[in-house]
């Protein structure tokens, strides 16, 4: 059975208070999560590694309530877990949201790349 040191999860479909923290801890993992009741939600799990949250959500849209991004420092590696918006149907409001979200993600990526650190890891899924 695989026991990875770091796991990134998307589409949790659980609000923060319903995240299965105890079950995850019983499996030997620490967890940071950014939950949401419906379709979204992201989490970073670590086994025997120190994890420190850097941030959740993307800057630039205080109205955005979708839980699609979390960032943490695991030991000395920066990990960003994301769940990209689908945007269907296009054109439409969901597609417009997707384009704005990608602009904010690009801005954050540029900030991280400006750090000039070899210790960046991005993991994401397009659903």
Image (spheres, rainbow, N blue to C red):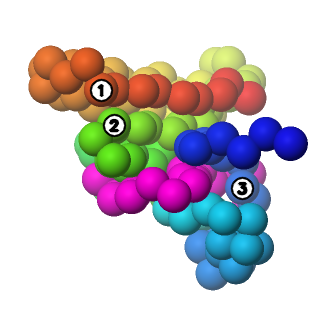
Mark 3: secondary structure: loop
Dots 3 and 2: beta carbons under 8 Å?
Answer: no
Residue 122 placement (x, y as % from top left): 46, 27
Up the image or down, 31 lies above or below 69; here it is: below
Residue 114 placement (x, y as % from top left): 13, 20
User: Which residue in the protein does label 2 denote?
Assistant: 77
Dots 1 and 2: beta carbons under 8 Å?
Answer: yes
Q: Between residues 37 and 54, which one lies in front from this camera angle?
A: 54
Mark 2: secondary structure: strand
The mark lying in front, picked from 3 and 1, is 1
Residue 61 placement (x, y as % from top left): 33, 47
Q: Residue at x 62, y 62 (%)?
A: 29
Q: Is residue 100 visible?
A: no
**For residue 20, which quarter of the picture?**
bottom right
Q: CA distance from mark 3 to mark 1?
A: 26 Å
Mark found first going from the N terminus, 3 or 2: 3
Q: Between residues 112 and 66, which one lies in front from this camera angle?
A: 112
Q: Which residues are magenta?
A: 37-55
Marks counted in the figure total 3
User: Which residue in the protein does label 1 denote?
Assistant: 119
Residue 14 placement (x, y as % from top left): 72, 66
User: Is 5 a magenta residue?
Assistant: no
Disc 1 crowd rating (10 Å Cα; few below 14, some 14-19, many 20+) is few
Residue 12's disc number = 3
Q: CA distance from mark 3 to mark 2?
A: 23 Å
């Amino acid at each position: 059975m695989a026991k990875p040191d770091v796991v990134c999860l998307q589409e949790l479909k659980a609000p923060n208070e319903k995240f299965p923290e105890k079950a995850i801890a019983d499996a030997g993992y620490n967890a940071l999560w950014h939950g949401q009741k419906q379709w979204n939600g992201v989490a970073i799990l670590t086994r025997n590694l120190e994890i420190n949250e850097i941030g959740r959500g993307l800057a630039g849209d205080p109205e955005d309530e979708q839980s699609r991004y979390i960032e943490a420092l695991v030991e000395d590696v920066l990990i960003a877990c994301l769940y990209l918006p689908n945007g269907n149907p296009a054109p439409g409001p969901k597609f417009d949201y997707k384009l704005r979200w990608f602009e904010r993600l690009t801005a954050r990526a540029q900030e991280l790349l400006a750090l000039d650190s070899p210790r960046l890891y991005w993991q994401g899924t397009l659903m």
